[in-house]
Amino acid sequence: MASPILITGARVHLRHPVPEDAPAFIALRERNLGFHAPWEPAPEDLSGVTGSTVQARTPADDFRRFLDDSSGDTNQRHLICDRATGEMVGQVSLGQIFRGPLCSAYMGYWADERHTRRGLMRDGVRLCIRRAFEQLGLHRVEANIIPRNTRSRQLARACGLRLEGFSPRYLRIAGRWEDHERWALTREAWERVESEICSGSESKSGEGGSNSGRAAMERSGYIRFNK
């Protein structure tokens, strides 16, 4: 049985994993090993051991870690599911959730390659951001992205995140220390974008209202429209 839906959009919804998700999750990870490998830690990266033999991490291991750490005070991990079919199309997580004066989280995501270029990941990441601010009461969400990961950078921009800075040799990924860009979004910036979108779409000026909403999203970087 699937876990309760946490938040839903027009085409996708987010939910936590349950044990019954194991076969579908493992199959997804297995068919995407090559697609994900350049952007993920290798086994020795996760262990913190350098120059020693470390047992390879399997998709089944990934699922156990994902399931065990999916819903807690410091981590919220979500499956992104197609509303029409229930199929997993990717995942998006909020990790290292800090309360108090920082009140923020780090966001990470990956997609099933066969569901890319459909806008479903964009929709899922936007839902996760909405959940971070509205349901979890966070103030800031940050994503760290390898500069050459063009798709991930485009997705962050399309979801309203802004490039804030650069961290040299920030994370060990695929066996090497990689530079990362810091992309982030605060609740105030997100609310401003949402307000501009709503005011543009609800305008009574007909076509001008639609154009106003489109301009607001493009100015903010929240979404890009095909010309």
Image (spheres, rainbow, N blue to C red):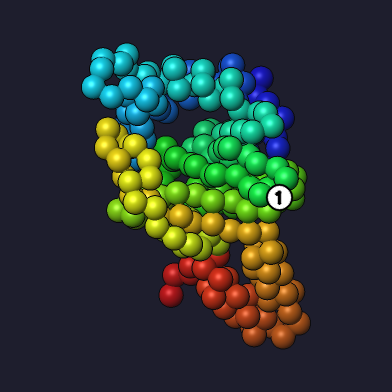
Q: Which is nearer the eye, 85 or 6?
A: 6
In the rendered image, the vertical position of residue 219 relative to residue 21, given as above or below: below
Give the x, y percent position of residue 21. 55, 21
Give the x, y percent position of residue 155. 46, 55
Give the x, y percent position of residue 212. 63, 80
- Outermost residue, left direction? 51
Which residue is at 66% across, 28% downward?
71
In the rendered image, the vertical position of residue 137 relative to residue 26, given as above or below: below
From the viewer's perspective, is 106 left or right of 196? left
Q: Look at the image and tell me whether residue 108 can be seen.
A: yes
Within 10 Å of disc 1 (Cα), the crowding (few <14, some 14-19, many 20+) is few
Residue under numbered circle 1: 101
From the viewer's perspective, is 168 left or right of 186? left
Which residue is at 26% across, 15% downward?
53
Q: Look at the image and tell me whether residue 159 can be seen.
A: no
From the viewer's perspective, is 29 left or right of 188? left
Which residue is at 57% across, 78% downward?
215
Q: Secondary structure at mark 1?
A: loop
In the rendered image, the vertical position of residue 209 relative to residue 83, given as above or below: below
Tell me the kind of residue under disc 1. Answer: Pro
Give the x, y percent position of residue 43. 34, 23
Which residue is at 38% across, 45% downward?
170
Q: Quadrant of residue 7?
A: top right
